[in-house]
């Protein structure tokens, strides 16, 4: 466990279990959303279960997993099996720790992961996702709900998905899949005005003198205290949360299993709100931060 995570773990066991419940439900919804199941989607589900082995025998995993396994064992998902899984997912959805909005955003992230699990996104899957979103309009104004809706509307305008659109959708959906080494968002998109733009800056110009920095997630190279110390030595200031005084939010490459969402937490969420309200906070990946330090001889 990363040293920066130890202080959070003892306070977040219930939160992490609830997040895992909602994520598994979303993955199941995502891989069955078009009424079909294939080997790659099953591999994705099994990989997710393997990475969450510590909770697979706990309720409600021990209730949901056997039902899903039995339904997809023959590689064919009947309409009745699909309906049974969706019904069970709704019944097991957890809002004991998180509120409805956060719980359903956790599901949305996982649904996108389930859809992209077989590396192919179909028109049928997008339409089904659009239907799901229509039933969850309480998520409007919450990132990335509006962005997903805008992408779907634009892509389906001509009722087909071309190669460029498919690559864009695949890259965006995969941002919210925290498997293997990809623990944080790296190049997601955000809706600003009527345009979808990149959330994380590409090759950003990072200045330190009289600039405010906030950090989220963990790094394999620095502790949080070391990050803050470097910034202060270079004339900047460190802040505990995004605000109008923060110019850069740096996302640690190791992420944080205690985040509210799979690949980001409240600080990124708040930074996005500030961006949409007109603040010029720049969200940068840790690797770009290290490049900036090298440029400054640190």
Image (cartoon, rainbow, N blue to C red):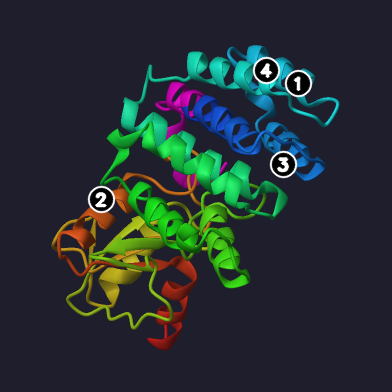
Q: State the image quarter where residue 276 is shown.
A: bottom left
* Dot in front, 1 or 2: 1
Along the line of sight, which residue is nearer the eye, 197 or 243? Answer: 197
Q: Quadrant of the N terminus?
A: top right
Along the line of sight, which residue is nearer the eye, 211 or 50? Answer: 50
First in sequence, mark 1 or 4: give its number.
Answer: 1
Is disc 1 placed on a helix, strand or loop?
Answer: helix
Is residue 158 positioned above or below 206 on the image? above
Main SS category, magenta section:
helix
Callout 1–callout 2 Cβ contact below 8 Å: no
Q: Which residues are magenta?
A: 1-18
Along the line of sight, which residue is nearer the eye, 227 or 69? Answer: 69
* Dot in front, 3 or 4: 4
**In the image, farthest residue toward the right:** 74
| Residue to which mark 2 is pinned | 270
Is disc 2 placed on a helix, strand or loop?
Answer: helix
């Amino acid at each position: 466990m990363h040293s920066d995570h130890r202080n959070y773990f003892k306070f977040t066991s219930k939160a992490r279990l609830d997040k895992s419940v909602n994520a598994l439900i979303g993955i199941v919804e995502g891989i069955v959303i078009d009424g079909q199941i294939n080997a790659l989607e099953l591999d994705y589900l099994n990989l997710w279960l393997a990475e969450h082995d510590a909770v697979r025998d706990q309720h409600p995993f021990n209730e949901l997993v056997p039902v899903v396994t039995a339904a997809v064992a023959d590689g064919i998902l009947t309409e009745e099996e699909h309906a049974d899984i969706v019904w069970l997912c709704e019944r097991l959805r957890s809002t004991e720790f998180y509120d409805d909005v956060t719980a359903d955003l956790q599901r949305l992230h996982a649904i996108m992961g389930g859809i992209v699990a077989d590396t192919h996104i179909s028109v049928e899957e997008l339409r089904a996702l659009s239907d799901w979103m229509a039933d969850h309009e309480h998520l409007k104004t919450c990132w990335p709900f509006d962005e997903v809706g805008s992408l779907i509307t634009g892509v389906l305008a001509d009722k087909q998905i071309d190669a460029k659109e498919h690559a864009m959708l695949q890259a965006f959906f995969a941002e919210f899949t925290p498997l293997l080494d990809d623990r944080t968002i790296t190049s997601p998109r955000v809706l600003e005005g009527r345009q979808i733009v990149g959330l994380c800056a590409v090759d950003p110009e990072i200045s330190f003198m009289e600039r405010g920095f906030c950090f989220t997630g963990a790094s394999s190279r620095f502790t949080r205290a070391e990050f803050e110390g470097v910034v202060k030595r270079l004339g900047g200031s460190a802040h505990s949360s995004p605000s109008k005084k923060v110019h850069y939010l740096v996302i640690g490459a190791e992420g944080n299993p205690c985040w509210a969402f799979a690949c980001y937490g409240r600080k990124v969420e708040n930074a996005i709100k500030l961006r949409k309200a007109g603040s010029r906070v720049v969200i940068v990946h840790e690797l770009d931060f290290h490049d900036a330090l090298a440029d400054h001889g640190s």
